[in-house]
Image: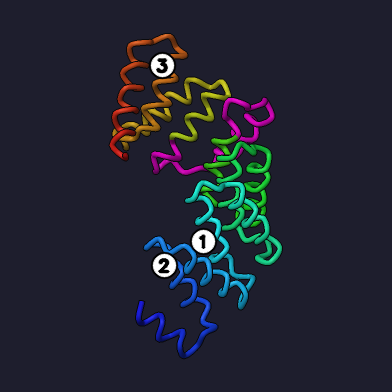
Amino acid sequence: YKVIEKVLSKNPKHIVALNLRGEIDLAFNKVEEATSSFNKALDIQPAWWIPYRNLAAIKTRDGHVEKAIEILKSALPATKNAPSILSELALLQARSGDRAGAKESYRAVLEVQPSNLVVLNNLAMLLVDDEATEVDLEEASRLVVDLPEHKAPLLDTKAWVAFRAGDAASAETLIQKGLKSAPESPDLHYHYGLMQEAKGDQAKAIEHLKKAVELGSRGF
């Protein structure tokens, strides 16, 4: 921290130092000081996306998701629709129930980063939620075609999209492959349990759903 202050004493407009000071202050719950540093950095360089993200994170942490969304939306013109801002915005929109807004934000990222695996994954999972339409399912199926299968979370997504689209056989093959590589994944067990329930195998469904709860609780 002393090094950062020394840098700023020589150059008060050092935006990286200002942002870093804000992040350190935030880590120690000095919200007002952190907010001031982030805003100073933006006053100097309004096109830099990171301070906007940090300001939004403060609001999210305090439970003010709508205010965080406002901050991220306000950042879009200055940052020229920075993919990192759009990705964060989409996550918060989905969290707040704005499904249409989240889809629009994710798609905007894919326009400039069509191979962004995180966004492809997140959008696909959003499209196959309980409100999914046939159009949503078709889009999700297209999105996951080229997702690599060497990572369990991506396999889980491909499997769940296949299941929701009506291809139970492919879904089971994919999810079993995922469970072999990541037997401790709560998401894989959860989705496999739901698949077994749909097949009518209640015993296997309960087994995997219980496993999902057990593994998921370890993170708390």
- Find residue 139 and report its image quarter: top right
- Residue identified by numbered label 2: 25
Does 53 lie within the magenta span? no
Give yes or no for contact between labels 1 and 2 (Cβ–Cβ under 8 Å). Answer: no
Q: Residue at x 53, y 27 (%)?
A: 162
Q: Spatial distance from mark 1 to mark 3, Cα to Cα?
A: 42 Å
Q: Nearer the viewer, residue 131 or 18?
A: 18
Q: Are marks 1 and 3 in contact (CB under 8 Å)?
A: no
| Residue lying farthest to the right in this orientation | 77
- Count neighbours of disc 2 (C-alpha within 10 A) and say few if under 14, some if 14 to 19, many if 20 or more: some
In this view, the residue farthest toward the bottom is: 10
* Up-down relation of residue 171 to residue 153 (above or below): above
Q: Secondary structure at mark 3?
A: helix
What residue is shown at x 65% (from left), y 48% (from top)?
105
Mark 1 belongs to which amino acid?
Asn
Query: What range of the chain is rendered magenta?
Result: 127-155
Counting from the top left corner in percent of width and height, residue 219 is at: 31, 40
Q: How many marks?
A: 3
Q: Position of residue 24 (x, y in %)?
A: 40, 68
Q: Quadrant of the N terminus?
A: bottom left
Between label 1 and label 3, give the one nearer the viewer.
1
Mark 1 neighbour density, 10 Å: few (under 14) some (14–19) many (20 or more): many
Q: Give the residue type at disc 2.
A: Asp
Measure the alpha-carbon separation of dots 1 and 2. 12 Å
Judge by depth and name the residue closer to the eye, 3 or 101: 3
The structure residue drawn at horizontal position 37% and vertical position 63%, both measured from the top left corner, is 28
Q: Which residue is mark 1?
A: 54
Q: Nearer the viewer, mark 1 or mark 2?
A: 2
- Which amino acid lies under the numbered mark 3 shown in the image of this protein? Gln
Q: Residues within 10 Å of mark 3 (few under 14, many from 20)?
A: some
Find disc 3 in the rendering and name its residue.
196
